[in-house]
Image (tube, coloured by chain):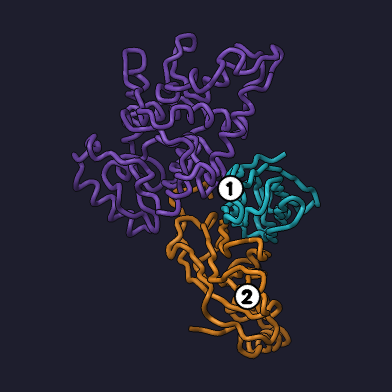
Amino acid sequence: MRVLVVAVIAAATAAAAAGEIAPADRRSGYDFAGPETRAMQDDDTANPGMLGVLQGETLWTAKTGAAERSCADCHGDPRTSMTGVAVRYPVFEPRLARPLDLEGRINRCRTEHQDAEPLAAESEDLLALTAFVAYQSRGLPIVVQGNAELQPFLDLGNELFHRRQGQLNLSCSQCHDDNWGKRLAGAVIPQAHPTAYPVYRLEWQSLGSLQRRLRNCMIGVRAEPYEYGAPEAIALELYLMVRARGMLIETPGVRP
Amino acid sequence: MDERWSERPTRRLVLLAAAGLGLPPPAEASTAAMDQAIHALVGESTVKRGKVKLDLPPIVENGNTVPLTVTIDSPMSQTDHVTGIHIFNEKNPQPYVAAFELGPRTGRAVVSTRIRLADSQQVVAIARLSDGSFWSDSADVIVTLAACAEG
Amino acid sequence: MARVLINLPAEAKRGEIIEIKTLIAHPMETGYRLGPTGVTIPRDIINRFVCTYNGEEVFRAELFPAIAANPFIAFFTVATESGEIAFSWTDDHGETQTEVRQITVE
């Protein structure tokens, strides 16, 4: 492993100026997964992530909170109201003066409009609702882009993506910009585009969020992972979505 | 091909002898467990090769969820059909994976599921037919670890 | 009630062989994993799956911890007549969940 890592770093520093992936070369993690994993994602009747989407569908109409209000009470038919939503997130929330991801928006709806407690990060219900909302944008291109308000957070995300970290002293960019398509031990390195989240990761045997996956990456380079909802985590999410702008949503994806 | 499960229980004797001497079981202990489990199913009958096709990916991206399909060449008629399909593995903590019961109403002797494999190993599928005969297929699977996990 | 995904045709011709795909949400705790305190998490799996067609059993599966979480089982059956196809999953506690689907057979 150490020899491999040294080789990777050597290759990366040699191609130091390589930087971002050309837009035409961008590929979803789906393309790097094996045929059986892809087949699992392709079949809605056999995709384990769909169990979460189904659960989200039930939660959509469930009255909740002191306000006894369901998502449906305000948003009606999700197939119209939620189409094109996931592709815009994270968005800048002026009342908080910071970006909010989809999970954050769902929880804000709960506290502000349903008078309910926010759902815990990575809880089954939050993942189910997020998967259900993102599913309504399946097949649509990501449209997140920088603007005056988001720029400082985008800059932070950019910096974090290119910063070496952890005991292995690797940056996200070194693997996912400079060495995608090559192998890290038995696994193919994807380009790290968040097109399929929440994703059914076979390693987790459940749905999980992008933030969970980022934590896994950080543990992989032996860095202290960001807490759920940390500013660094949201900044990275924002950066990754802008980096993937134009790519299509696949939620619920299946990944190894 | 290796008809291990139709040979005499030499390995079992070795295991018992080793245990008696207070030695740790030989490294093949889990293979022996699979052999024993298969013996328990088929008794002294010979398990024939053929009719059964066990589909597993040769290289597995994640051992937590491995798609598996067993197909048996059988008319599935009243007089000639598959009655059971038994799946065994070599290196998991226990040798059993699943057992399916079929009959003439099944129509087609094809079953798919998803299994867990703890390590690179052999998986064996044994079909029992209505005439009491046993047929099998096996597959060798390489299990790779996912990159960058929580553990 | 665990989430379930069942796929089978709503209509079929008499004698047609139809494919049925089932997926149920369940962690299938193997009994071999160690919890955060080092204590083994006890086994808790779905150990039996039965499919009946108008009350007659047409397919059965005995499952072990080696079956992946959110068990997926796909099999075939002959569309013999119109009626109810029922699916039951039983876990280690003896609890059974049953789902029923209608089929129209011409």
- Say which amino acid is labelled 1: Ala
Marks 2, 1: nearer the viewer: 1
Tag on residue B34?
2
Q: Report helix, strand or loop for mark 1.
A: strand
Q: Nearer the viewer, residue A133 or B93?
A: A133
Q: Is residue A76 above or below residue B111?
A: above
Chain letter for mark 2, please. Answer: B
Q: Residue at x 66, y 14 (%)?
A: A69
Q: Position of residue C40 (x, y in %)?
A: 70, 55
* Quarter of the figure with residue C73: bottom right
Q: Position of residue A8 (x, y in %)?
A: 29, 52
Q: Position of residue A256 (x, y in %)?
A: 46, 50
What residue is shown with label 1? Answer: C12
Is residue A124 in sight in this rendering? yes
| Chain B, hue in figure | orange
Q: Report helix, strand or loop for mark 2.
A: helix
Quick one: which chain is cyan?
A: C
Chain letter for mark 1, please. Answer: C
Tag on residue C96?
none
Q: Residue at x 32, y 45 (%)?
A: A175
Q: Position of residue A17 (x, y in %)?
A: 18, 39
Q: Is residue B3 above or below residue A42?
A: below
Q: Nearer the viewer, residue A230 or A188?
A: A188
Do the residues marked 2 and 1 share a common chain?
no
Tags 2 and 1 touching, CB below 8 Å: no
Q: Residue at x 67, y 22 (%)?
A: A62
